[in-house]
Every structure is written in structure tokens, then in C-alpha cells.
Amino acid sequence: MVAFLRFGIVGTILVAWELLSGGWFLATSSIALYFSSPLMILEAIRREHQLLLSDLTVTLVEAFAGLALGTTTGLMVGVLFARFQLLDRVFEPFFQAVNALPRPALAPLLVIWFGLGMTSKIMASWSVVFFVVFYNVYAGVKSIDPDFIRAIRFLGATSGQIIRIVVVPSVVSWLFAALRVSVAYSLLGAIVGEFAGATEGLGYRMLVAQGLLQTDLMYAILFMLMFVGVALTSVAKYIENRLLRWRPPVVSI
Amino acid sequence: MHSATREGAEKIRIQGVGLSFLSAGTKVPVLKGIDLSIREGEFLTVIGPSGCGKSSLMNLLSNTVDEESAAIEGRIDIVWRSEARHRLGYVLQKDTLLPWRTLEANVGVGLEIMGLPVAEREARVQEWIDKVGLSGFEESYPFAMSGGMRQRTNIIRTLACNPEVVLMDEPFGALDAQTRMVLQQILVDLWYASKTTIVFVTHDVEESILLGDRVVLLGRRPGTIQRIYDIDIPHPRSIMDVRIAPVFQDTYRSIWQDLKGAIEVSGTNRPTSANSA
């Protein structure tokens, strides 16, 4: 029933969009120039699919590299800060300040530092993912119940065993809880990086299409990003649910 | 000498033990002049008004008092049979099951730490799970378990390691009355089948008699031993039968009288028969 209604809504919107814009029939209408039309978008995808796929690959590589880098560094620094009070107390305001900075504003500078290639986008993606992972891992280590450690020590555990049995699983669970957000942010970082200056990638293609008033191509890119975003978040959610089966079911946000 | 307890060699000797916490330059005495000898294989229960230092006594026995902020007097000797790291078990007030481990994996954690081969570990875990009636719940996670199941798991996790001495700090405190009775029976059976020495802290007079070979009554802070009661009820015990036995009733009355005295001195003095006499 719900699925039926959903299809109905999407179908109605697409048909209305097509008819109201008059797009495919009157390709010169000014409405179609602004709003394009579903059939024109499909046509754009067919026409440019090779270019779009290669741009998509570039963007995904950048996002994944940023995700991997952000997760590893965030994990390491998070554990370090949670373990060493002094580090935490000294650096806390700096981290807050940098995290408060809207990261897109950083992108133009990153392009100057790292060039028009992938590196600057990876850094942009990293700059967002890092903080998400850092704060999660930090909270994860801090939230470990001291009574867990006490009880496990009474069972004869050495410090190494305590880390393996209590600390690592606890941190990993927080890491995976952050995964869904990190994945979405890594994509955001890559696109913003491409906006600031690039020679390939979906974000770059978007700017080019904008310059040429190719709204059909712009829509095509938006839809691709939407599909990729949904697919990646679903995968992250699946992994999270598989690994965090031990958590009581909660209402997801 | 009475037939109720199994006679064993001295396991724990506590001599002139006192404990004070140091806070802001002042000494706050918590325990004073404790002398106690605990036999091997004995089930000793400790009872007293809240704040009398019961838990501190457990921390002294487990050697986990922070010596930076406390002054300890006297000495505690425990005659160990092995050098194993897990020879002393401590069941804390709240259960500390690891939420990401299944019931089975939680029970096995101590054996895992000991480095037992997987096959042997699994067999022993299953044995303990069967003993306390948790079969069929091996794959459950703690969030889905009832309080009674969690505490059973918590207890067998410690007992599975075969500790020589087990300290228990009000393990049944948070359970409802029925679950508590079931777990008391399980615990007393498990203890009877093993050679473990148990020191069990509780604030429940009934529980202290049902489980204990001897009951130690601590007075209000600074805690001193007020009296030690021999519980002359033979083992194996049935919790239900003990409850209605005359010796239980008598002991209950006598402990409650003494305990009431300790509470009233520290609390508000309400008129009692003693006052009007």
C-alpha cells in the first residue's frame, strides 16, 4: 500500500513535470530551459553517459579516500585524546574552533595548496570526516564503563586483554555508528572540493553544465548523486545493523 | 562446633584491620579493629546498616583500596593454593556483562582470558549455562535479558574460572523478590557443589541467614564486628524449607534486634519498648 502510494506520487510528479514544462515536445520553451523535463534528463544521461560515469568514478574515489583517511586519523587522534587528559584539555578549544568553521570555506585554499587534482578534494573530504569520527571515537572511549574494566580485571585480564576485550569493541561500535554520517559527509567534501577548482568529477561537471545552461545535465548529475548517496548510506546502515546487533532497537533518526 | 558447616583449614585471616579515608586533610574512619577468620569452603555473609563499611571490607579483601586516599591498618592473609590471576572472583553490585557479547560469550570471557582452548571453553561454558537453567538463551544479548538472567550470567562468568575465593557485593540487591529466591537457591547449590569460599555482603537479614554458614554483623560507622552468628542449618539447603524452620525464625529475630540497635543509634531515635522501660 505504502509502496503503491509512493510510486503513484513519483509517477504523478514526473508526468506533471513533463507536461507542464512542455520539454520534450517544445525543446525551445523557456520553461524547459529552466526546469528541464524528465525525458530531456534521460536523453542527457544517454548522450553523456560515458562522461558522467568517468566523473562519477573520480568523485567516488575522492570520497572514499577522504573517508578512509578521515576514519583512520579520526580514530587515532580520538583514542589519543581520550587517553591523555592533557592533550584533550590543551587542544579542545582549537578543535572546536576548526570544527565550527564551515568547511566549504576551506576548499579554495585547499586547491591552492594541493592543486586541481584529486588531492585537494580528498583533503576537503577528510576535513569533514575527521571531526565526525574524532568526536565519536572520543565519546566511545570516554563512555567505557570503568566497572567493565574492573570486572574484567577481576577475571584475571592483563592490560592488553582489557584493551582487546573491552576497549576495542566499544570503540569499534562507535566507529560504525558514525559510518552512516561519515559516508554522506565524505561525498559532500568531495563535491565541495570540486566546486572550488577541478578538471573532472561530478561537482566540476555541474559547474560546466551551469556555465552552458545545460539544465538537463545538471539534473542528471543531481539524480546520480542522489542515487549514489542512497546506495552508500544503505550499505553503511546494513553494515551498522549487522555489526551492532547487540544494541537494543532504537527509533532511528 | 556444629554440624552445619564443613570444617576446613583457615583460608582468610583478618587481624586488627582498620580503614580510614583521607579527605581534605581529615581522617574519616570507616572500619575499625576487624578480627575475623574465614574457613576454606565457608559461605560467610556480612550484614550491617548502610554505610557501615561492608563494601570497603570487600575492597580490602580484594586489595583494590586506593592507597593514595586511604589509611589501612592491620593485615589480611589469604592462603592461596595457586598463583592464577583469577583465583579471587569479585561479583560487583551491578552486573557488568559486556553488551556486545552474547550470553555464551559473556560466560566464556574469563576462560578466554585464562587462555583455555576453544573446544574446552565451549564445553565448560555450556555446562555452567545448563547448571543455572539458561539453556536456549546462549545467543541472547544482555539488552534482551531479564535482570535475573543477567545476574545469573554474571555469577557463572566468575564461577566458571574456579576461583578459590569469591566476593559478592549485594548481587541480588536489584532483583524482585521471586527472582531473588530463585537465584539464592541456585547460588547456594552451586556453592555446595564446589569448594569455593564465599564472602557475601547483603543488607537483607533474611538473605544473610538463608545463605550463610555464619553471619557477621557490622555496627555503624566506623564499622566494627558486633556479633557473629553461627547458622545451624544443615546443607544442602532448600531456601523454601529454611524460611519456615524455627531456627531461622529465632536467628532472624536475634539479628534484627541487634541490627535495629545499630540503626537506631545512628538514625532518629523513635520511642521503643527499650525507652519506656
Image (cartoon, rainbow, N blue to C red):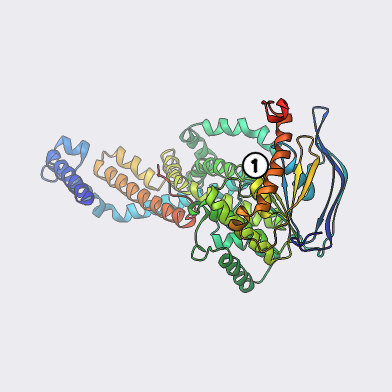
For the point 69% across and 26% down, which residue is it? B269
Chain for numbered disc 1: A
Q: Residue furthest bottom?
A: B119
Amino acid at circle 1: Ala
The correct choice, above or below, for A175 with respect to A109 in the image is below
Residue A191 locus on image (x, y percent)? 41, 43
Return the residue at label 1.
Answer: A82
Residue B245 locus on image (x, y percent)? 63, 55
Q: Nearer the viewer, residue A227 or B192?
A: B192
Is any part of residue A149 visible from this angle? no
Q: Residues within 10 Å of mark 1 (few under 14, many from 20)?
A: many
Quadrant position of the C terminus of chain A in the picture: top left
Residue A227 locus on image (x, y percent)? 33, 50
Is any part of residue B196 visible from this angle? yes
Q: How many marks?
A: 1
Residue B34 locus on image (x, y percent)? 84, 44
